[in-house]
């Protein structure tokens, strides 16, 4: 017989635990896997109906705002030094990386956080994922990017520039493949949360 050592309920912190913690705010029906690494809880706001799966890392030295009805798959990394916003009905598949700071790789400056700022240069900018944005597995979002409402980014894509809404994008670097149907907005109107 295959027995689980832990029930699914014990693998996640739920809203009742999280609302007592250090977070800026936590809504209802929020679940965060116990094996996540979270730094800067006081800078994180979370809406309702959010699940963050195992082995995710959230570094919130800047403000991280997660809306409602959001899923963040396992092994994601959100580096929010300059701020990250995920609006409602968004999702990150497994292994997505979001960066708001990045070294200048041109060779004009030294790199890595152990080098004094007088010798290094950082590319910095907040990342915003608008409503109904989904990001495919193992994609990377770079500093200063805004992804427009309703857009979908395919797996293993590199997003270095902002993307217009209601498109399906993929590639390295990412490019627009086709339109995405805005029917999601009609479904949202019909949606009645439990």
Image (cartoon, rainbow, N blue to C red):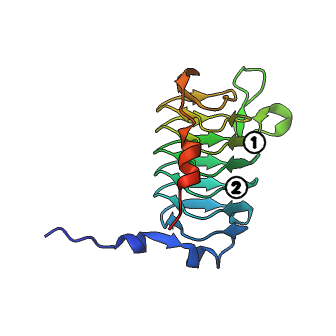
Q: Are marks 2 and 1 in contact (CB under 8 Å)?
A: no
> Seen in the image, is 77 located left or right of residue 120?
left
> Seen in the image, is 1 located left or right of residue 184?
left
Q: Residue tagged by mark 1?
A: 126
Give the alpha-carbon distance from disc 2 to disc 1, as whole Å.
11 Å
45, 185: nearer the viewer? 185
Number of other residues with Cα within 10 Å of mark 2, as a class: few under 14, some 14 to 19, many 20 or more: many
Residue 47 position (above or below residue 159): below
Q: Is residue 126 visible?
A: yes
Number of other residues with Cα within 10 Å of mark 1, as a class: few under 14, some 14 to 19, many 20 or more: many
x, y (%) of residue 22?
Answer: 69, 72
Seen as rendered, the residue at the extreme right is: 118
- Single out the mark in the foreground, 2 or 1: 2
What residue lies at 59% left-to-right and 71% top-to-bottom?
28
x, y (%) of residue 2?
Answer: 17, 67
Q: Residue tagged by mark 2?
A: 65
Residue 54 position (above or below residue 13): above
Residue 173 placement: quadrant? top right
Residue 35 position (above or below residue 18): above
Seen as rendered, the residue at the extreme left is: 1
> In the image, which disc is placed on residue 76?
none
96, 147: nearer the viewer? 147
Looking at the rendered structure, the secondary structure element under dot 1 is: loop
Could you tell me which quadrant the N terminus lies in?
bottom left
What residue lies at 53% left-to-right and 64% top-to-bottom?
193
């Amino acid at each position: 017989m295959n027995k689980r050592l832990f029930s699914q309920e014990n693998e996640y912190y739920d809203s009742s635990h999280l609302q007592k913690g250090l977070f800026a705010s936590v809504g209802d029906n929020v679940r965060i896997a116990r094996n996540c690494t979270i730094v800067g809880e006081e800078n994180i706001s979370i809406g309702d109906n959010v699940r963050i799966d195992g082995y995710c890392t959230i570094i919130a030295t800047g403000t991280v705002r997660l809306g409602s009805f959001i899923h963040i798959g396992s092994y994601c990394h959100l580096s929010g030094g300059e701020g990250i916003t995920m609006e409602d009905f968004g999702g990150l598949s497994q292994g997505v990386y979001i960066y708001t700071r990045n070294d200048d790789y041109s060779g004009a400056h030294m790199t890595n956080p152990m080098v004094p700022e007088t010798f290094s240069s950082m590319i910095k900018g907040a990342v915003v994922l608008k409503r109904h944005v989904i990001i495919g597995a193992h994609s990377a979002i770079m500093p200063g990017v805004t992804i427009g409402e309703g857009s979908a980014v395919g797996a293993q894509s590199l997003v270095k520039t902002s993307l217009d809404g209601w498109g399906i994008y993929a590639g390295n670097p990412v490019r627009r493949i086709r339109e995405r149907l805005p029917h999601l907005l009609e479904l949202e109107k019909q949606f009645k949360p439990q």
